[in-house]
Image (cartoon, rainbow, N blue to C red):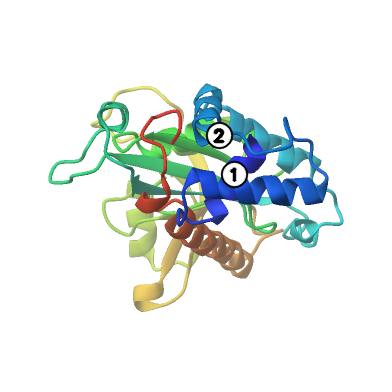
Amino acid sequence: MITFLLATVTDSNRRGISHLLDEFWEAASKAGLDLPQASPVSASAITQARAKLPSTAMREVLWNLVNRMPDGCAARQSPTWRGRRVLAIDGQKLNTNRSDELKTTFGVPNGCHCPQLLFSVLVDCCARMPVDFEIDSYRVSEREHMSRMLDSVDDGAILVLDRGYPSHDVLQDLVERKIDFAIRVPRSNTFLAVEEFLASGRSEAWVTIARPAQAQSGGRKVRVRLVRFGRDEDETICVTTLRRSSFDAAAIQELYHLRWQAEESFKATSSNVLSQGLFRSASANGV
């Protein structure tokens, strides 16, 4: 069932299920795959079988794929950066087909005609492959998706995030989990420590980030390193736990650019594979 579903994605929704079944059955037979019967099942039968497949199935397949990938495959040729695995998270809002169930499950933004979901992926930047993912209503935040996927960040990995993710709670959570990170922070509407760092004109510094006074009490102060690189409009400010003795400013810049490569790869995949026209299902479980 899983193999057939993957085959339907490669078709880009050009043909109906019956045509795909005929082609899949022929190809699977030639490849020696075990099939339930000699001739293709009906379109209604495969649709009913798909409806019984739990939504967690694809995540389990992904986890097994990541864990069992042999060292000799192409994705493992450059598995680390400076001896460390580098992971990044990216998210995108996508439209689905229109149905009452999808409207109820994912919601429809004001002024839009189609239900919309938030799709987030944890990506291995060096192997250029997904490690985990989350799908929810468009109303759910990217930070919540990030929090759910942190259990898939293995020991010793470095997490690289863009400027939509940092908050005091996020930094504190990562520090408590002992996950090293490099996160881009905005230049305005940002942490007070970042504003003071920018005003100082320094290129890097260790600072303490505390919860804003107007926010609820609780939470510890977080000690982090700020690094700036680039010029003018291209200047980037990163907050990181990586020490300068092992990762100087040039290394942090190189590390952040790995996230950009993963982001571009994710955008290309999501636009080509997960566009509105390729969501065949009108049910939440199917999506």
For image coordinates 53% across by 39% down, the residue present is: 133
Dots 1 and 2: beta carbons under 8 Å? yes
Q: Is residue 107 visible?
A: yes
As helix, strand or loop, the secondary structure at mark 2 comes to loop
Q: Could you classify mark 1 by the number of other residues whose Cα lies within 10 Å: few (under 14), some (14-19), or many (20 or more)?
A: many
- Tag 2 residue: 42
- In-front residue for pair 234/195: 234
Residue found at the far front of this picture: 39
Q: What amino acid does circle 1 point to?
A: Leu
Q: What amino acid does circle 2 point to?
A: Ser
Q: Could you classify mark 2 by the number of other residues whose Cα lies within 10 Å: few (under 14), some (14-19), or many (20 or more)?
A: few
Is 170 drawn above or below residue 204 in the view shown? above
List x then y, in percent, for residue 62: 65, 39
The span from disc 1 to disc 2 (Cα, nearest Å) is: 8 Å
In the figure, residue 252 lies in which quadrant?
bottom right
Dot placed on the residue nearer the N-terminal end, 1 or 2: 1
The image's mark for residue 170 is: none
- In-front residue for pair 32/271: 32
For image coordinates 58% across by 66% down, the residue present is: 249
For image coordinates 47% across by 54% down, the residue present is: 15
- Tag 1 residue: 21
Is 41 drawn above or below residue 238 in the view shown? above
- In-front residue for pair 208/276: 276
For image coordinates 57% across by 34% down, the residue present is: 150
As helix, strand or loop, the secondary structure at mark 1 comes to helix
List x then y, in percent, for residue 73: 81, 57
Determine whether, in the image, residue 101 is placed left or right of residue 125.
Answer: left
